Image (cartoon, rainbow, N blue to C red):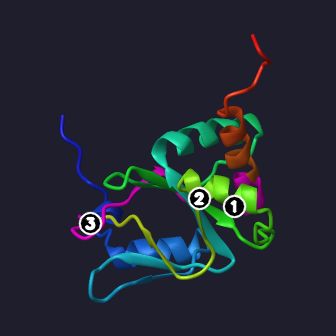
Amino acid sequence: MTYAKSAASMQDSPLTRSMFYRRICSLPTFVDTVTGQIMMTAGSTGAVMMPTDLAQRVKVELQRRNVGPCPTIGHPRARAWSYLVRTADMRPIGDPAALAELWRAHVVVIRDGNIVLPTPSPDHHTHRTWIVPATTPFRPSGSAVLACVRHVLDAAKPRNHGPY
């Protein structure tokens, strides 16, 4: 048995997907006229990007804390994930040791600039996929995601159990 594609899926393009992201997900997107990529201007929504192995452990911690679902972009070529987050409650990290720990773990907080979102058409420049797709305006607190990152990193530290 074969299935016909719906009219909506046959007409999906970077422009229609960008409109979906804007209207349904409240993401400030636009289509780059040169590359055809869907871009989002960071501001009230930003991202926390990290290596995939760390991101998978953070996802488990987010689920354990009932934070989510968290829209998550996969960057297969870079082996990284980006969690889309609300930035309003994110303050600069003042503790140099905490900042250094995030730096060593390759965790990047994106509060301004452009973020590339997955497109429905092949992307020849940089490949993006949805790990957890954005389908609503919900984004978790950036501070909550960073707290989970720090918890996971802290749990991975070797413990000194004394001389024995």
Pointers 1 and 2 in contact (C-beta within 8 Å):
yes
* Figure check: 27 above or below 82: below
Q: Nearer the viewer, residue 106 or 121?
A: 106
- Can you see residue 88? yes
Q: Quadrant of the N terminus?
A: top left
Q: Quadrant of the C terminus?
A: top right
Determine crowd level at label 2: few under 14, some 14-19, many 20+ residues with C-alpha closer than 10 A. few
Q: Magenta segment: does it hold 140?
A: yes
Mark 3–mark 2 Cα distance, whole angstroms, equals 33 Å
Residue underneath mark 1: 99
Q: Magenta segment: does it hold 96?
A: no
Q: Residue at x 71, y 55 (%)?
A: 146
Residue at far left of view: 1
Mark 1–mark 2 Cα distance, whole angstroms, equals 6 Å
Q: Secondary structure at mark 2?
A: helix
Residue underneath mark 3: 121
Mark 3–mark 1 Cα distance, whole angstroms, equals 37 Å
Q: Amino acid at mark 1?
A: Leu
Determine crowd level at label 1: few under 14, some 14-19, many 20+ residues with C-alpha closer than 10 A. some
Q: Residue at x 31, y 54 (%)?
A: 77
Q: Earlier in the sequence, mark 3 or mark 2?
A: 2
Q: Amino acid at mark 3?
A: Ser
Q: Nearer the viewer, residue 101 or 82?
A: 101
Q: Amino acid at mark 2?
A: Trp
Question: Viewed as shown, does residue 22 lie left or right of 45?
Answer: left
Q: Residue at x 65, y 80 (%)?
A: 43
Q: Which residues are magenta?
A: 121-146
Circle 3 or circle 1, nearest the eye: 1
In the figure, residue 144 lies in which quadrant? bottom right
